[in-house]
Image (spheres, helix red, strand yellow):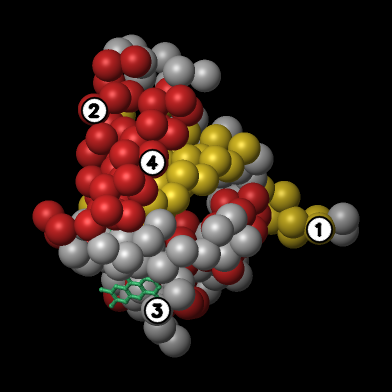
Amino acid sequence: MRKVLFLKSSILGGYSQSSHLVDYAVEQWKKSHPNDVITVRDLAVDNLPFLDGELVGMLAPAEGTVLTDRQKSVQATSDALIAQLKDQDVLVLGVAIYNFNISTHLKNYIDLICRAGQTFRYTESGPIGLSGVKEALVLKANGGIYGETHSSIAYLKQVLGFIGIEEINFISAEGMGYGDEVKTKSIADAKAAIDAYLSK
Ligand SMILES: Cc1cc2nc3c(=O)[nH]c(=O)nc-3n(C[C@H](O)[C@H](O)[C@H](O)COP(=O)(O)O)c2cc1C
């Protein structure tokens, strides 16, 4: 039995291709791994707070620091997100590309879960990830066709590696803006790749 957290992050609701892939993966996951415990959340509707000049002070306050009520409240939200993440074996991210990057909502989640002493710590030989999550699967959709060297992939590898996730798999539905034929084939290929991933 493994615990698996699926995070959607598209702003396009029912039109979202990455959320469509997440829904498909959840459905197939339940069929192929019926004992796994699955949690799904949608960061685009979660209404999580964004970091600002006040809230940054709640990330890793020095001992004895007195937090404002707002800092305390957001720290509790961040604590809960981190507790949920650290309880998982696998993280599955639905990733939408907007203006060449991940969505604001996913970046915001990352800003809330990257906390020194909790999901990473620095040592004399560099950072160590503390999330305890073993594996990530990224289900990405983008209008263009960028391949595996896209900056969004490099970024996600870096930040997920930073919190200690060593095995990271990417499945991309590319060319969502290239017309129906390309789009249909790309989604079908992504679903086949999900099936192959789940049959490993
Ligand atoms: C505001 C906005 C910006 C976008 N910018 C890009 C972009 O920079 N590169 C790209 O390949 N596609 C871009 N697209 C297309 C999306 O990547 C495409 O619609 C993809 O399906 C988004 O994932 P989603 O359907 O899960 O939301 C953009 C779409 C929107 C709505």
Q: Would you name the residue on which mark 4 appears?
A: 190
Q: Compared to 91, does 42 lie above or below?
A: below
Foreground pick, 165 / 199: 199
**Which residue is painted at 38% across and 31% down in the image?**
192
Q: Would you name the residue on which mark 3 appears?
A: 99
Q: Would you name the residue on which mark 2 appears?
A: 27
Q: Are marks 1 and 2 in contact (CB under 8 Å)?
A: no
Q: Would you name the residue on which mark 1 appears?
A: 126
Which comes before the other along the chain, label 2 or label 3? 2
Which comes before the other along the chain, label 4 or label 2? 2
Q: CA distance from mark 2 to mark 3?
A: 30 Å
Ligand 1: does it lie within 8 Å of the C-beta at label 3?
yes
Q: Position of residue 96 (x, y in %)?
A: 35, 61
Q: Position of residue 90 (x, y in %)?
A: 47, 34
Q: CA distance from mark 4 to mark 2?
A: 14 Å
In the image, taking residue 14 as reference, residue 73 lies left or right, namely right
**Which residue is painted at 52% across and 19% down in the image?**
200
